[in-house]
Amino acid sequence: MSTARTAEHPVDPQFTERWSPRGYTGEALPREQLMSLLEAARWAPSASNQQPWRFVWALAGTPAFDAIHAGLMAGNQGWAAQASALVVVLSVRSQVPAGQTEPKANPWASFDAGAAWMSLALQARASGWDTHAMGGFERTVLDAALQVPAHMAIEAVVAIGRRGDPAVLPEALRAREQPNARLPLAALAAEGRCDFGA
Ligand SMILES: Cc1cc2nc3c(=O)[nH]c(=O)nc-3n(C[C@H](O)[C@H](O)[C@H](O)COP(=O)(O)O)c2cc1C
């Protein structure tokens, strides 16, 4: 563990021990294991329990994996090819609330989908797997490939795999293959008003 991950206050180690590698072994991810990760995501909290998260998943070696991979930006395509699975996280931007008939915009859809992705990431780590979220994808390509309906939006693509030897990575990525740091808590949390320093 890098010293970049020293907590300022006591936390469960799962929070500092999760990080996003790019070097993966390519080991096959059992379908049941993937379901366990998605199950963790299912139990995330959401505004009015609307559960505005959806997941399109694909295991390595399948046409579905290739289609999602083809929608990644070039910088992600290289390393993500070694992932064991790719999961596209979508949010439901508008839906019909319980007891109503008209669809209503959900302003918390992204917030809630983010909570679900984090649950997936922490469950993956607890199961000996790693995750790496990517905002670097071609939206028009993935929207078409996945037939994303108008009331949903892709939030990110998540690579899942077993952390591997950084030596498989190109030099520039190899140097970054370690846990990174965080802003000090004082720059992120303030009492009573937005006093976060400069
Ligand atoms: C929404 C989102 C989008 C991201 N997009 C990319 C990406 O396109 N490519 C990449 O290599 N990493 C991407 N990352 C990974 C972040 O750079 C990484 O999470 C951040 O540096 C913190 O490091 P850690 O996850 O190892 O703790 C993304 C992460 C998130 C949450």
Image: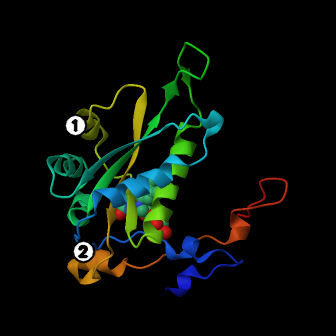
In this view, the residue in front, 54 or 144, is 54
Q: How many marks?
A: 2
User: Which residue is depicted at the point 48% across and 70% down?
Assistant: 126
User: Which residue is depicted at the point 51% across and 50% down?
Assistant: 116
Q: Residue furthest right?
A: 192
Please tell me which of labels 2 and 1 falls first in the chain.
2
Residue 92, x across and y down, in percent:
47, 33
Residue 172, x across and y down, in percent:
29, 76
151 sits to left or right of 159: right
Q: Give the quarter the ligand 1 occupies.
A: bottom left
Q: Residue furthest top?
A: 101
Q: Is residue 95 above or below residue 74?
A: above
Say whether residue 166 is visible.
yes
37 sits to left or right of 30: right
Q: In this figure, which residue is indicated by the disc labeled 2?
A: 25
What's the CA distance linking mark 2 and mark 1?
A: 27 Å
Q: Is residue 71 above or below residue 197?
A: above
Does dot 2 land on a helix, a strand or a loop? loop
Label 1 amino acid?
Ala
Does dot 1 land on a helix, a strand or a loop? helix
90 sits to left or right of 73: right
Q: Which mark is residue 96?
A: none
Q: Residue furthest front?
A: 32
Please identify the quadrant where the C terminus is shown.
bottom right
User: Which residue is depicted at the point 52% across and 41% down?
Assistant: 110
Q: In this figure, which residue is indicated by the disc labeled 1?
A: 145
10 Å crowding of disc 1: few (<14), some (14-19), many (20+): some
10 Å crowding of disc 2: few (<14), some (14-19), many (20+): some
Residue 121, x across and y down, in percent:
46, 61
